[in-house]
Structure formats: structure tokens, C-alpha cells
Amino acid sequence: MGGSGERARHWRYAELPGVDLLRARYVRKAFVRHTHEQFVIAAIADGVEVFHHRGADQYAGAGALALVNPDTPHTGRAGVPEGWRYGAVYPSPEVVAEIAAETTLIRGTPGFVRPVLDDPYAVQLVHQVLRAAEEGNALAADTLLRVAVTRLLRLNGGALPQREVRTAGARVAARVRAVLEERMAEPPTLERLAGELGTSPFALLRAFRDAYGMPPHAWLTDARVRRARRLLDSGTTPAEAAVAVGFTDQPHLNRHFTRIVGVPPGAYRIERKNVQDERERLLLPSDV
């Protein structure tokens, strides 16, 4: 991916399961409000990233890390004219929980307490993980990832609060989410959805935003991109994935996918195919 000095690579390393990897430099790029199923550990090398997180703009400059817990809405954009350059690892909740259980005293679901941490050493560790993955050094990549996550949890970790659906509004929001997940390709209108759930459109909007940090239509776009990613991971073409998740066509998927993931779906799929080819190569018996 290029243009105006911008470039990005979003990939996986077959020997580092449960972890997505990213190297990028963005100048004019702006990430819309979105979430990740994984943790975000973004190590800023140059420039400044600004991201809106839990009601406030957060600033991460060179030597700092932007840290976002799973399913937490956030944005992203340049904080200075020259943009920002960074490397990121996206470990799954299962990977982080395994590391936390082995190396920390955190009880419950582990997560990050503050969204920005100034720690040049941890930034260096993240970039070393990426370099090891690029070089095919499985032992180093795995070791450095565990060291980096352990350090970040010890410096900035804690147990995430458990979400409990108690209020009527929270129950409505959960039902709306279930309907949108089930009928993603052909979702109902807001008015029809509110009628089906026995509430008003405005009350539904307020309840959903309170529960998930964004209105239903924005959440649906985010969920469609998530599902499209899983389809691309399994080998589905971008055109087929677009139709399957409810986008009108592939350009529609391309636009939203790039605004959320940071790379076009075609480039994303190529990297996933490379990982699958590498896995198949590793499983083949050696020539005798």
C-alpha cells in the first residue's frame, strides 16, 4: 500500500498463532470509530498518533505505545503534519490471558489500564517481534512477544471489569446486537427494529450507544468488516465476502475495510494466503 508516503503491511506469521502484525506509516489516513476482537499494542516509532478512546483524545508520540483492549471503540489519525510511523501486534484475548496467567498476579480477565504508556523499551520489543517474524525467526518472535506483553501487563495491567446486563436499556442493546448479527446482510430499518423490540427509535439509539460506544449503523459496518476479515482468512475472495456480509459491492467493502483495517481487502487476503501456504509447507513431510 502506498501513496503520499503512506505504506502498510498487515500480516500473520504462521509460527505466531493468534497474533496479527502490522507495520505502517500514515500521513492523511484516518481510522473511523471501530473495534478489534484482539488487543491493540501499537508502538510509535516516529510522529504522533491521536486516537479517541473512552470520551477523550489520546496522544501517543515516539517512544510511546497506544494500548486498546478488545471490543473498545476507538479512532486513529495523525497528530502532526508528517503523520506517524508505527509497528503493532494484535494478540488474541486467549494469548494475553495465557501470558498473564503464567507471568503476572492478575486475577480475572487481563487488560490494559491506561491507553497510552511511555516506554521506549517496550516499543523496541514490539519492533523486534515484527523483525523476527519478517526474518522467520520463530523462537525470537515468540519469546519477544511474551516478554513485551508481560512487561506491559506488569506496568499497565489489571483485571477488566465484567460486563453485566442489568438495566432494561442494556438488555435492549444486547437484543439489537443479536438481531444485527443474525441479519447482517439484510438488516431492518431503525424504526422496524425498534418496533420489533417494543421500544422507540430514540430509546434504542441511546441504549445501544451507551452499551457499545457507537450507534447501530456504525457498529454494523464494523461487524461486517470483522466478518469479512474472517471470510478472507478462510480464502473467500473480496467480491464474495462483500456480498456475504451485506455490502452492495466490492468497492463498498474496499472503502470501509481500508478505513478500519488500514489496508485494502485484496492486500489483506494475499498476506493470509501466504500464511496458509507456509503452514501447508511446514506440514509436508521432508524429502528423504
Image: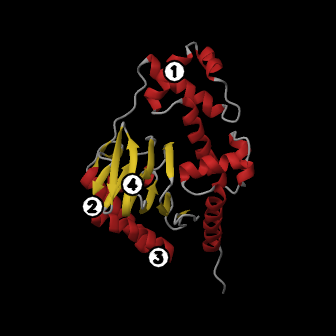
- Does residue 25 appear left or right of residue 198 in this picture? left
Q: Secondary structure at mark 3?
A: loop
- Looking at the rendered image, the disc whose residue lies closer to the viewer, 4 or 3, is 4
The residue under the point 28% across, 59% down is 151
Asked which quadrant contains residue 122, the reply is bottom left
Residue at image mark 4: 49
- Looking at the rendered image, the disc whose residue lies closer to the viewer, 3 or 2, is 2
Q: Name the amino acid, label 3.
A: Asn
Badge 1 or badge 3: first in the primary sequence: 3
What distance separates the C-alpha of mark 1 from that of mark 4? 35 Å
- Looking at the rendered image, the disc whose residue lies closer to the viewer, 1 or 3, is 1
Q: Is residue 11 visible?
A: no
Residue at image mark 3: 137
What distance separates the C-alpha of mark 2 from that of mark 4? 15 Å
Which labelled disc corresponds to residue 119? 2
Badge 4 or badge 3: first in the primary sequence: 4
Q: Name the amino acid, label 1.
A: Val
Q: Secondary structure at mark 4?
A: strand
Badge 2 or badge 4: first in the primary sequence: 4
Residue at image mark 1: 172
